[in-house]
Image: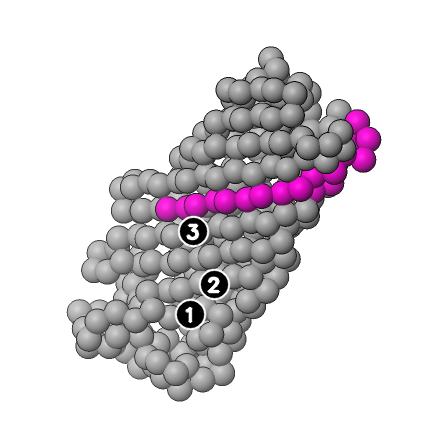
């Protein structure tokens, strides 16, 4: 995003994203792990539009704070599971047999609180460092004929909903650049990286973006660009790990108002 002048700005927009998501399950009878593809194996939508919102404030010429939010909520139904697998939640170990119907829900919400400092300012170029916090609630749910297992003994399949929620607070640090190459046009881009190990949760995220911005008038700007988000969340449970990886990439469009 372009560096803020002193004052407030609000931006709305979104990313038309292609999502690639995997879930690490366990083969039956302790035969190892299996990486299941949410889009291929669980029929979650691969392409979707993700709305994004941001409010920011610039002060003392070089300092900027912002709060932003975007979400990825998807649900898919597989009429015939091709590979049996086990997984664990806080409630216990569960088993999904091959051949059954399964509905899967995977929800990500990303809240970002960010502070940026412009360490270099020139007539046409600005460079800044930033840091802050991402809070990422993740919800994974399976609905279908699922067996519950206790001490390696599994009950018969029963229609049930099994879900697990994880909230990963990820501190972030990154760099941002803004180049004004004509009075109305600018090119901006940046990268942020996040990593955290906290109790039983490990979180990793990479955020890379580039954007061309056009100034319509002193109050309105529009931007078109590209964004890439890589998110990995792991939770260590009593017997096994619960691991979900998500890759989101696509074209971004936003409109912002400065006042």
Choose between 74 and 247: the one closer to the eye.
247
- Sequence-wise, the earlier of marks 2 and 3 is 2
Q: Dot 2: within a 10 Å radius of its alpha carbon, few (fewer than 14), some, or many (20 or more) residues?
A: some
Query: What kind of element bears circle 3?
Result: strand
Residue 167 appears anywhere in the view: no
- Give whichever of discs 1 and 3 has the lower sequence position: 1
Tag of residue 231: 3
Query: Which one is earlier in the sequence, the residue at label 1 or at label 2?
Result: 2
- Residue 148's disc number: none
Asked whether the beta carbons under mark 1 and mark 3 sit within 8 Å of each other, the answer is: no
User: Spatial distance from mark 1 to mark 2, Cα to Cα?
Assistant: 8 Å
Q: Residue furthest front?
A: 181
Q: Which residues are magenta?
A: 204-223
Reply yes or no: does residue 214 show up in magenta.
yes
Image point 46% across, 81% down: which residue?
101
Report how far apart the C-alphas of labels 1 and 3 lie in the structure. Answer: 15 Å
Instruction: Kindly check if marks 1 and 2 are in contact, taking CB atoms under 8 A apart as contact.
Output: yes
Badge 1 density bin: few <14, some 14–19, many ≥20, Cα 10 Å: some
When asked about the image quadrant of residue 181, the answer is: top right
On the question of residue 126 being in view, the answer is yes
The secondary element bearing badge 2 is classed as strand
Q: Residue at x 52, y 38 (%)?
A: 190
Residue 229 image point, x, y percent: 49, 50
Task: Judge whether 5 appears above or below 236 on screen.
Answer: above
Q: Which quadrant is the C terminus positioned in?
A: top right
Residue linked to disc 2: 20
Other-residue count near label 3 (Cα within 10 Å), few / some / many at <14 / 14–19 / ≥20: some
Query: Overall secondary structure of the magenta stretch?
Result: strand
Asked whether the beta carbons under mark 2 and mark 3 sit within 8 Å of each other, the answer is: no
- All told, the count of numbered labels is 3
Instruction: Note whether 36 is above or below 200 in the view shown.
Output: below
> Along the line of sight, which residue is nearer the eye, 135 or 10?
10
């Amino acid at each position: 995003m372009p560096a803020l002048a002193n004052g407030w700005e609000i931006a709305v927009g979104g990313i038309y994203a292609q999502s690639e998501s995997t879930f690490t399950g366990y083969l039956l009878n302790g035969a190892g792990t299996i990486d299941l593809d949410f889009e291929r194996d669980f029929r979650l939508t691969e392409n979707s539009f993700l709305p994004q919102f941001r409010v920011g404030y610039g002060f003392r010429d070089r300092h900027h704070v912002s709060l932003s939010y975007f979400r990825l909520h998807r649900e898919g139904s597989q009429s015939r599971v091709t590979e049996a697998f086990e997984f664990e939640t806080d409630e216990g170990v569960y088993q999904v047999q091959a051949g059954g119907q399964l509905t899967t829900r995977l929800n990500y919400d990303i809240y970002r609180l960010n502070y940026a400092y412009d360490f270099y300012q020139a007539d046409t170029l600005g460079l800044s460092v930033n840091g802050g916090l991402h809070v990422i609630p993740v919800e994974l749910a399976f609905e279908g004929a699922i067996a519950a297992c206790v001490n390696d003994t599994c009950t018969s399949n029963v229609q049930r909903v099994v879900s697990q929620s994880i909230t990963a607070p990820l501190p972030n640090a990154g760099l941002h650049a803004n180049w004004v190459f004509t009075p109305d046009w600018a090119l901006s881009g940046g990268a942020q990286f996040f990593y955290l190990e906290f109790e039983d949760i490990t979180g990793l995220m990479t955020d890379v973006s580039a954007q061309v911005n056009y100034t319509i008038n002193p109050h309105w700007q529009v931007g078109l660009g590209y964004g890439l988000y890589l998110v990995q969340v792991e939770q260590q449970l009593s017997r096994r790990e619960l691991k979900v990886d998500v890759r989101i990439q696509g074209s971004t469009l936003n409109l912002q108002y400065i006042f």
